[in-house]
Image: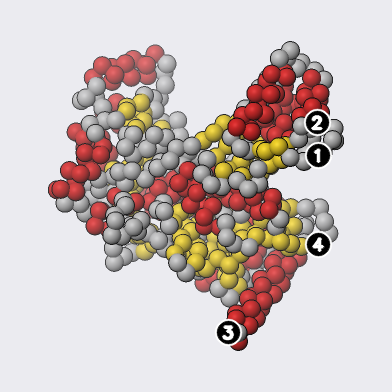
Amino acid sequence: MRIDNPSQEQLRHYFKRLDEHAGQTPQWIKYLDLGTHIVKLINYSPEFTPHVQKQLTYVLKNSAPHHDATLVIWKETDIKALTLNLDEKFNPKTNLRLRVEMLAFKTKSISLQVFDETYSKHQPLLNIDPYNGIVQAHNPKTNTYYYAAENLEPEEFIKQGHIFVHTLNKIIKTPNSGLVHGAVVGLDNKGILFCARGQRGKSTLAVLAMMEGFEYVSDDYLTLSKDETGLYADPIYSIITLSPRMYNELYNDLQGKFVSNNARKDKYVINIAPYHERFRRHYPISVCMFPEIVSGPEPEIVPCDKYSKGRAITQLIHSTINQTGDRHDMETIRKLMSFVNDFEFYKINLCADIQANVECLRNFITDYNKRKEKSNDELCVK
Amino acid sequence: MTNYVLNEEKMFADITDGVAIVINSETGIYYGMNGFGTTVFENIINGVSTENILSALKSLSGAPADIEEIFNTFVKALADNELIITGGTGDSAANINAEAAAEDKFTPDVREYSDAQELLLADPIHEVKEETGWAPDKAALNPDAEDVSRRESKMV
């Protein structure tokens, strides 16, 4: 069911209903420090606590001097009732039809989406998705986001992917900042942004680099923000995802706690809180890199030609907007392009020897830093 | 012989796992193709002439009688949207993915995704203020009555 352009009264009613479903007394109120934004997190359900603590360990704070948005979370116990009660007052006939449809098709519930064109043509303001057991909404007037899940069992909830990723994407999104699907590691405050789709080796490379002493921001999702001094990355999640083969290969050395098998058995999710000392905030990006797995005996890093740079940027944008549902959002696409377009792009051809890949990266960034220092010195002399 | 190349001055493109994605670097418009569209597009930007591609398409088992018209329409769509421009001189044979052609019922598709200003309206955190540019507007998070009224007028 779809409701278009509801009145203010309807919207107020919807958000009141959501507030009622969330609960009366929060379990706790904490804050997510995402670098560019601080989110006040109001949790009404104890079942949410371990998921937040495991996935957002690094950015979860007990207090904050201010906040930019509020996120209300709870375990929804009756999605069907929420769907039926939401708009009954305003559209009794539609509601009756909904009840009949539910009865006739024996469906547990029917999805409900509320669209407001002044907000977005493609993203609903309120979305009740009974098939995935998820409720998401945004009240623009108070800048309050809502997120509820029906099933918070660890192996079920992990199917939703990184916790709150779509909501955080909306919160972080400004003309100068955005949530990006990419990886960032570096040395001596010189960051490398890996631009690639999934399954291209960026996670393994980033994680192993972190284990080998590199500074670390993320292997998957991160915040990018740009100002007059440069492009910066901030971490969001304290989990990494590794293929079972890589997990087994790193098993003896990786100091993380197993979280889940990602419910699909193709990835393991691991909390890497023991490596928080390697995490960096507001980490400057120096170069962009396009990883590709090749069959060569040794890894190599070469400058990208125009086509390869285009591929790298396309993959960064495509994987980001695909993960966040922003394919129609030209502003975001233009912004991401403007973030990276002026950087030097290199292609790293990854070989099967993952340690050799990391050493290749270390040599590259060390040489790169020396070259930059030398060129800065020369500029000073001139 | 007619040849095209990727319009590299304007377009970023990537073909991975049989899916072509092209992004207009000036406008931010995003293009996605189905499997058949991708295999045709890949041949085009690899410098295979349109004549050779058409010849390969006609020889595919199950190719419809109007395959030439279908192909020409697709190439025109690519050119009209400036994904490709005339150029190059290649004369190599085409390598068309017959499975993708059959799967997509010989209908190459290029889809444009575009909608400016998406998600930036009615959102206080992203509100534009002349004096602060695009910086997050903290005051907007605690709006006064006048502010609420202004926002409400946007939403109905």
Q: Would you name the residue on which mark 4 appears? A: A298
Q: Position of residue B61 (x, y in %)?
A: 80, 18
- Closest to the observer: A108 or A137? A137
Please report, as a chain letter, where disc 2 is located. B
Identify the mark at residue B89; answer none if there is no mark.
1
Q: Do residues under tags 3 and 4 come within 8 Å of each other at their CB atoms?
A: no
Residue A181: where, in percent of width, then height? 54, 51
Q: Considering the image in quadrants, where does the C terminus of chain A appear?
A: bottom right
* Viewer can see residue B17: no
Q: Residue at x 24, y 57 (%)?
A: B139
Q: Label 1 to label 3, Cα distance in Å?
A: 48 Å
Question: Is the N terminus of chain A in the top left, top right, bottom left or bottom right quadrant?
Answer: top left
Mark 1 and mark 2 lie on one chain; the one further toward the N terminus is 2
Subunit bearing disc 4: A
Q: In this rendering, which labeled residue sits more in front, label 1 or label 3?
A: 1
Q: What type is the residue that disc 4 sits on?
A: Glu
Position of residue A246 measured from the top left corner of the image (x, y, whole percent):
68, 55
| Residue contact between numbered discs 1 and 2, judged by CB atoms under 8 Å | yes
Q: Amino acid at mark 1?
A: Thr
Q: Nearer the viewer, mark 3 or mark 4?
A: 3
Q: What is the distance, in whole Å, between disc 1 and disc 2 at their CAs?
A: 8 Å
| Residue sitting at x 65%, y 43% | B7
Between the residue at mark 2 and the residue at mark 4, the CA separation in whole angstroms equals 41 Å
The answer to whether A380 appears left or right of A307 in the picture is left
Q: Which residue is mark 3?
A: A380
On screen, A272 above or below B58? Answer: below
Three-letter amino acid code at disc 2? Met
Which residue is under mark 2? B1
